[in-house]
């Protein structure tokens, strides 16, 4: 994962990278390649298929971090390493009140969502997981992100409500 190459973002991105790897390594039957092994490929010209083949992995998590003052946007994609097909993607937008708390929160949401995508049958193993539906959880996380980044405008509240109603329709 090349989370970010900009020096301002490197510390935050590195922390998210470490936390995501740690969280993913706790998933049964999922082997996670170390950050050290992956970093040597981050700046290479190899394709994701070539990287996946060299590492012997089925999936690659790719992402970026953009930080503007006290606002951060993390974009994450889960990619099938053999077919180069994007399986899942999400954006996480936060106000950066506490760097470490924000880093941990985003890392947990990312790893939970990847866990749901890869092993939905074991969703009950996730701490505090409110649903067994990948779609419902994704809608819930996106609605929570809107609340944190856009505040309580009429438009943001309407969008959040629609997402939460869709989540409930998926899994009451």
Image: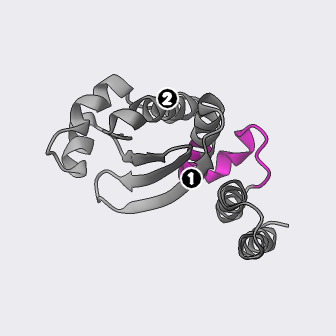
Reply above or below: 121 against 172: above
| Disc 1 secondary structure class | strand
| CA distance separating discs 1 and 2 | 15 Å
Q: Residue furthest front?
A: 69
Identify the residue at image location x=71%, y=40%: 126
Mark carried by residue 139? none
Q: Which residue is mark 2?
A: 15
User: Taking 61 as reference, is 151 left or right?
Assistant: right
Badge 2 local density, few (<14 within 10 Å), some, or many (20+)?
A: some
Q: Nearer the viewer, residue 124 or 75?
A: 75
Residue 157 position within the rendered picture, expressed as x and y whole percent measured from the top left: 77, 70
Picture mark count: 2
Q: Nearer the viewer, residue 94 or 106?
A: 94
The C terminus sits in image quarter: bottom right
The N terminus sits in image quarter: top left
Q: Nearer the viewer, residue 141 or 168?
A: 141
Residue 129 position within the rendered picture, expressed as x and y whole percent measured from the top left: 76, 46
| Highlighted magenta segment, given as a residue range | 110-131
């Amino acid at each position: 994962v090349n989370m970010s190459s900009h020096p301002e973002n490197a510390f935050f991105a590195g922390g998210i990278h470490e936390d995501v790897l740690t969280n993913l390594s706790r998933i049964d039957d999922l082997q996670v390649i170390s950050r050290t092994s992956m970093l040597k490929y981050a700046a290479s010209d190899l394709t994701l298929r070539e990287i996946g083949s060299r590492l012997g992995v089925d999936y690659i998590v790719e992402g970026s971090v953009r930080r503007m003052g006290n606002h951060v946007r993390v974009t994450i994609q889960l990619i099938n390493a053999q077919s180069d097909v994007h399986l899942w993607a999400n954006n996480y937008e936060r106000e950066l009140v506490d760097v470490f708390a924000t880093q941990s929160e985003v890392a947990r949401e990312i790893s939970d969502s990847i866990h749901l995508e890869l092993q939905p049958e074991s969703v009950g193993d996730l701490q505090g997981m409110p649903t067994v539906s990948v779609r419902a959880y994704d809608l819930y996380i996106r609605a929570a992100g809107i609340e944190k980044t856009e505040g309580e405008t009429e438009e943001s509240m309407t969008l959040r409500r629609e997402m939460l109603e869709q989540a409930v329709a998926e899994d009451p």
